[in-house]
Amino acid sequence: MEFNATLIGQAIVFLILIWFTVKFIWPPLTRAIEERQKKIAEGLSAADRGRQELEEAKSRADAIIREARERASQIIEQAQHRANDMIEQAKSAAAAEGQRLVAAAQQQIELEASQARENLRRDVAQLAVRTAAKLLEREIDERAHADLINKLAAQI
Amino acid sequence: MATEQGGSSSTEYIVHHLTHLKVGEGFWALHLDTLIVSTLLGAVFLWIFYSAARKATSGVPGKFQAFVELVVEFVDNQVSEVFHGNRGFVAPLALTIFVWVFLMNFMDLLPLDYPALIASAAGAHYFRAVPTADVNTTFAMSITVFVLIIFYSIRAKGLGGFGHELFTAPFGSHFLLWIPNFFLNLVELLSKPISLAMRLFGNMYAGELVFMLIALLGFTVAGLDLGSGLGFFGQVVMGAAWTIFHILIITLQAFIFMVLTVVYISMAQAHH
């Protein structure tokens, strides 16, 4: 054990080491560490936030899909309704048309029948007149006896 | 290891290894070996940590930066547990002490004769490679720490407060108690640097001495007889065991020096 000027030299070396470490080594290293800690903390919170947002978006998407499904089934139901209505309408329209046609045909038939009957009646009247004229050997004036003929025709 | 020393006796061997490479006489003498090794190791410390600090990135660190950051964070955690307040000076001080003392202690693990061999090749007859086994190194550090303790005491309490505390704590402010108070405080204050320096010096000096004694076992190797066999076995096995155990000691001593420094400085700020 021997104390000498080495002590002073070592103290100077020590002070230089301390000064250099305080000034140039410690600050950048701790700054880097602290910045990284901050970055990691931010990353973790961002990941948390992202997860939360994802969940929210998922539930929102679920709600939208549910709503869309409901709407779709509503629309299908409506369409079905309308199709049924249209079929019913078409059916009733067709039925009405049919009836109308039938009625028109009947009318026509009746008209034609009465016309035929009229013609027949006239023909029969003329035939009768002609037969009578033949029988009487005398010309019956059709014009003079139109009244008579018509009365006869109506009687047949 | 010791066989390179040729015919020198045990006493000569130990004395040789305990003699510093010295220039000058009396107080103004310098231990060149201590100064050279400790300055070189200080430069190594600064170079390693500065090259990491210069390229330090807050992104993904490389392995080298991760290692340096590991040391820095370890020291910072130790300091933050003990010292409350701005660590801008105390934490790097602790880092300097820890790494520098560790590196200087580490010289103890080099094979005992090799540094001396290298030095003698450079023309130096004596060379002690472990700067912390030199009281000048340990006291230089502990006295610097002592000055810092005084500085922090005065900064926290003011010159008057510190002086007042020296005379009135711990017994009280009665004027009859001034002398015993001052005496106790003086002992308490001075015991800090002395114990700090002597603990480190004692451990490293004793460790070095044990290495020398183990190396002396190799002196008994003279041929293929039982005694030589035991000596060789002792040197190799005990040397290895002591080296492995010493890894713990050198780290622990560096750690203790660092933690006690921080504790003393944080105590200096506290009021009695």
Image (cartoon, rainbow, N blue to C red):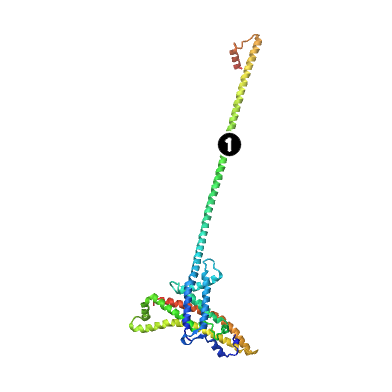
Side (left or right) of A131 relative to A19: right
Q: Is residue A1 visible?
A: no
Side (left or right) of B164 relative to A61: left
Q: Residue at x 41, y 78 (%)?
A: B150
Quadrant of the rendering where the C terminus of chain B is positioned: bottom left
Percent x, y for residue B40?
53, 78
Side (left or right) of B180 relative to A2: left
Percent x, y for residue A80?
57, 43
Q: Is residue A57 visible?
A: yes
Three-letter amino acid code of the residue under disc 1: Ala
A104 is higher (above) or lower (below) than A72: above
B81 is higher (above) or lower (below) than B20: above
Q: Residue at x 55, y 42 (%)?
A: A81
Q: How many marks?
A: 1
Quadrant of the rendering where the N terminus of chain B is positioned: bottom right
Percent x, y for residue B145?
45, 79
- Disc 1 secondary structure class: helix
* Chain letter for the residue marked with disc 1 in the picture: A
A77 vs B79, nearest the viewer:
B79
A95 vs A2, nearest the viewer:
A2
Dot 1 surroundings within 10 Å: few (below 14), some, or many (20 or more)?
few
A129 vs B107, nearest the viewer:
B107
B159 vs A120, nearest the viewer:
B159
Percent x, y for residue A114?
61, 22
A57 is higher (above) or lower (below) than B21: above
Question: Which of the 4 quarters of the picture holds residue B179?
Answer: bottom left
The residue under label 1 is A90
Side (left or right) of B244 relative to A12: right
